[in-house]
Image (cartoon, helix red, strand yellow):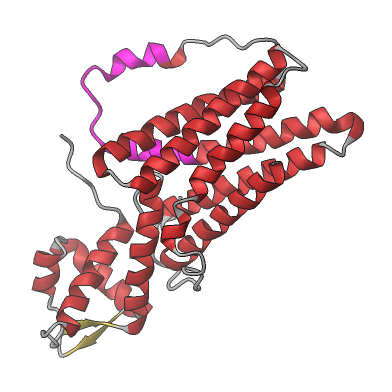
Amino acid sequence: MAAAYRTHVSIIADILATAKQYSYEGYDKGASVTHFIHKANVPHQRLGSMVSLLTQSGLLYEESAKYKISEKGIEFLRAYNEFKGFAEGFGLKV
Amino acid sequence: MNLLGLGISAFIGRFAYSGYSTIASPNLLRLTFAFVFIAAGFAFLVAGLFAGDYARAIETVGLAAQAIGYFFIAFSHSLKSFDAPAPRNFALLVPMAVTPFLIPGNSIEHLVRSISFILLVYVSIETMASYMQTRKSSTLMIGSGLGLLALAELMAWYSFVYPGSLFYYVAIAIKVTGFGLLFVPFSKFGLASGLGGRLNSKIGSGL
């Protein structure tokens, strides 16, 4: 059976979800790069460019070498989950 | 009935566009194109009713626009399919793909309807295959809706073979029922939500 692949947008959503987990749920110091690698399952080579892209976009912000999700990032995650259901209705991935 | 189809497809297209503008997913962009073309097709079909001598030509343009819309959905599914590794005996499928199929008559309208039928059957099968994996009721609804659209194209083709019969009206009724099934899952997604502006134009990789 073929392995399930992730789209670019779903990888971004995984990174944001990890940052959210370490921003609010008792771990309010933010997510480190190691957290992103392990929890969001993103290779280190790819992570740097993606995190800087998300930081520039205002979806993440850096604080003491750790990353937290912004309000804009939370809004993105909410929209992602909503439209994920819409696309899955057509048998597609977001 | 065509106006109803126009409204439903325009609404789905608007929803897909709001999704694309928010999270910049390429698949949502393709769905936007698909439903914009389908809605435009319905608009042409309505316009054809008032076009007099040009009615047939305008109706054919509308059907062609809808076929383009179905192509965009099928294209999204084909990308998903080709992401998986090709089977070892993939080459055996090539002769089947290039085998010419018979088109009744030499009308462009027949050709367009045949293409729409093939695309819709493909999309319906792919969506049902996704339902078998996810077991989501919305996927089942949309897969059934797409299957009904394919059946409607077949019925419409029969209305050319047997002109003056009820096939045309049955086809329109099935088509609108199919679009109705596509619309039902929207009650879950929230009709008023997802209409925010694009958060970041850099996210997403285009077509």
* Quarter of image, res A39: bottom left
* Quarter of image, res B79: top left
Q: Residue at x 51, y 50 (%)?
A: B183
The main secondary structure of the magenta stretch is helix
Picture coordinates of residue B116, whole percent (x, y): 57, 28
Question: For this rendering, which residue is in front, B2 or A44?
Answer: B2
Q: Is residue A51 above or below residue A43?
A: below
Question: For this rendering, which residue is in front, B33 or B179?
Answer: B179
Q: Residue at x 27, y 68 (%)?
A: A50
- Can you see residue B193? yes
Q: Horizontal placement of A68 versus B43: left or right?
A: left
Q: Quadrant of the N terminus of chain B?
A: top right
Circle count: 0
Q: Horizontal placement of B153 versus A23: left or right?
A: right
Q: Horizontal placement of B74 versus B93: left or right?
A: right
Q: Is residue B189 above or below residue B170?
A: below
Q: Horizontal placement of B115 versus A92: left or right?
A: right
Question: For this rendering, which residue is in front, B55 or A10?
Answer: B55
Q: Furthest-right residue in view?
A: B53
* Magenta segment includes B166: no
Picture coordinates of residue B12, whole percent (x, y): 54, 53
- Can you see residue B74? no
Q: Residue at x 42, y 17 (%)?
A: B97
Picture coordinates of residue A68, whole percent (x, y): 22, 83
Region in magenta: B73-96
Q: Residue at x 65, y 10 (%)?
A: B104
Q: Furthest-bottom residue in view?
A: A64
* Magenta segment includes B90: yes
* Quarter of image, res B153: top right
